[in-house]
Image (tube, helix red, strand yellow):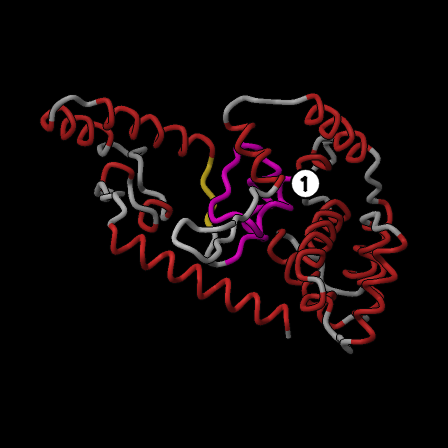
Amino acid sequence: VMLPEGGFGVVFDEPADQARLRRWAEDEFTAEDEVLAERWRSASAKLNLDASVTEARRSIKGLPKPTTLSEVSAQVDRYLETGRQYHFVCEAMERLGFGRSTRDKAMLRWRIQNHSSFRRFAPYTFIVYRTIMIYAAGLVLGLIGTRSTNCLDLEYLFYLPFSKVFCSGDQFLVEMAPVLLEPDQLFIGREMLRFDMKAISNVRKAETEVQREAVISGFSSGPNRPFSHALWNLIPRPWEQKERDLEFTEEGEKWLQNQIKQWTSTIEKASEG
């Protein structure tokens, strides 16, 4: 777009997924959302893990029988790290329902770039495949229940790579999440989060400083006090964040316009080259 002072600016459209989540947060749902949800539920219901269970049996064959999901995770990781990487990529794409065109392009990229690691070649697909393998091995060993909804709940775990904090009260997810979370991610139980949210709400509703201190004191006593989770040591409490001056100065506006001009110039040169 043209800037009033001359030069050009760049406008980035809101990504469709982000727009959809924003609408959902405002309780706005369209007919298209309903159709997509129905398609997702239908596809989930048809998810066949029989092959994953067979693969899981192969991965733990001849090894000491794990007694915890953490041990299962360690064995699956060793299997995926030392096994035939190309085979795993092909298996993952077939099992996850990738189309033929996508699979052909992926295999071409594998050969051209001379890859030797599934994890580095397709990180997110690897994470989903690993999650399914751990789940399947847990089923084989009887460490995970056979409740039919577990297969659907498994899909929540596919969002973990995009989360800093994961919360659930479902027993299956409570058991699975810890073995899948990275060191910089946190899990918090549903009841703990509800208790903490109640505390935050009451603190915010306090009309005076004296009332506020009394509320904090009341919620801070007892064995089930809020904010005892590691989460609260890493993320600032809302009432502790200082208000920021959001006014944009004339100097700041000029600086931003200059930055936009530089970025635009760089993009134009790159496109010409």
Foreground of the two, 199 or 272 = 272
Answer with the quarter of the image where residue 256 lies.
Answer: bottom left
Question: Looking at the image, how many numbered discs can be counted on the residues?
Answer: 1
Q: Is residue 92 left or right of residue 222?
A: right
Image position of 159 with respect to 76: above or below: above
**Residue 75, percent from left and from top:** 69, 62
Q: Is residue 243 left or right of residue 75?
A: left
Q: Is residue 168 magenta?
A: yes
Q: Is residue 80 left or right of residue 156?
A: right
**Residue 224, percent from left and from top:** 32, 33
The residue that disc 1 covers is 154
Q: Residue at x 57, y 36 (%)?
A: 19
User: SS at mark 1?
Assistant: helix
Foreground of the two, 26 or 214 = 26
Seen from this angle, which residue lies furthest left? 210
Q: Residue at x 74, y 53 (%)?
A: 133
Q: Is residue 181 magenta?
A: yes
Quarter occupied by the C terminus: bottom right
By secondary structure, the bulk of the magenta-drawn segment is best described as helix
Seen from this angle, which residue lies furthest right? 100
Look at the image and give the residue range highlighted in magenta. Answer: 155-182
Q: Is residue 57 left or right of residue 31?
A: right
Identify residue type, mark 1: Leu
Image position of 190 with respect to 178: above or below: above
Q: Residue at x 83, y 56 (%)?
A: 102
Crowding at mark 1 (Cα within 10 Å: few <14, some 14-19, many 20+)? some
Seen from this angle, which residue lies furthest bottom? 114
Image position of 60 with respect to 49: above or below: below
Answer with the quarter of the image where residue 116 lies.
Answer: bottom right
Q: Residue at x 47, y 49 (%)?
A: 164
